[in-house]
Structure formats: C-alpha cells, structure tokens
Image (cartoon, rainbow, N blue to C red):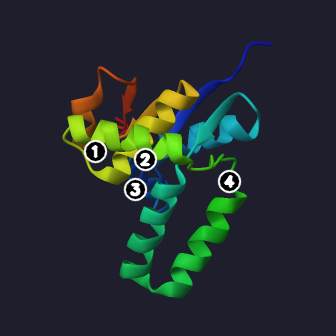
Amino acid sequence: MSDPTAFVLDSFALLAYLQDELVAPRVEKLLDNAGREKCRIFLSLINLGEILYITERRGGVVKAHDTLALIRQLPIEIPQVDEQTVFAAAHIKANHTLSYADAFVVATAIQENATVITADPEFQSVDALVKVEWLQIPE
C-alpha cells in the first residue's frame, strides 16, 4: 500500500472545525479519513499553542484545556519542533508575508510532503513552496 496522502492544518482550519463553521465539513472529512488511515494529518506544535491562546482569550482557561483534550483525541500528529524546523520557519518568515506561526505550517508541510489546509489568504505568498488547499464554503 502506498503512503497515505498528508495534510497540515493551519490554526484557521482546526478552529473552523472546532467551532463548526461553514468550512468545517472538509476538515471533518479529512479527520475521518485519517481515523481510517486513508491519510495523515499534521499540526505544528506552534499552531497548537496558537489555537490554545486564541481559545483561552475567547473562552477562558477551562475552555482552552477542554480544547486541548479534544484535539488530543483527534487523529492528528503533532511533530516535535526541533532546531531545524525553527530555522526553516525563520527562513520562510524572512522571505514571505505570513505570520511566524504560519511559517511553521509551511515548514511542517515541506518536512512531511503535505498539503496545507487553510482559508487564510496569507498562504498565497507561499504557494510556490507548498501545495495549498483552500477551504471553501460548501454549495
């Protein structure tokens, strides 16, 4: 069997899923496929931290802890952030107009040969580096 297709969720994509926004069905389908080992889903540890601080700001520390517990139950792999990843993200940030946290999405996608899942327009600046799948509201 060939290796499953790989995806990296950015913070926007996972928050959209967690908050059941209109673009959530695509993320839900990917998570379902990952649960059945049809694909692999990655989330950078830096982006997990971003999701947690956003959640805590909006709903408090208990909500952030609940969110972390939920994410840990999902079929998402969270690779270690080592020195090489930090240097790669810094290089990406230095040369492209996206946030530092989003640079870790790109670095992870490059390392895992994965497609970025997002609706964040900042990723337009890196579409030559990685494949990007743009979340869209279902018709």
- The residue carrying mark 3 is 21
Residue 138 sits in which quadrant?
top left
Distance CA(mark 1)–CA(mark 3): 14 Å
Which SS class for mark 1?
Answer: loop
* Quarter placement of the N terminus: top right
Q: Residue 30, labelled with which disc?
A: none
Q: Amino acid at mark 1?
A: Asp
- What residue sits 40% from the left and 56% below the top? 21
Q: Residue 10, labelled with which disc?
A: 2
Distance CA(mark 4)–CA(mark 3): 18 Å
Whether label 1 touches label 2, CB < 8 Å: yes
Q: Earlier in the sequence, mark 4 or mark 3?
A: 3
Q: Nearer the viewer, residue 23 or 41?
A: 41
Above-or-below relation of 76 to 6: below
Q: Amino acid at mark 2?
A: Asp
Q: Nearer the viewer, residue 12 or 49?
A: 49
- The mark closer to the camera, 2 or 3, is 2
- The residue carrying mark 1 is 120
Whether label 1 touches label 4, CB < 8 Å: no
Above-or-below relation of 108 to 112: below
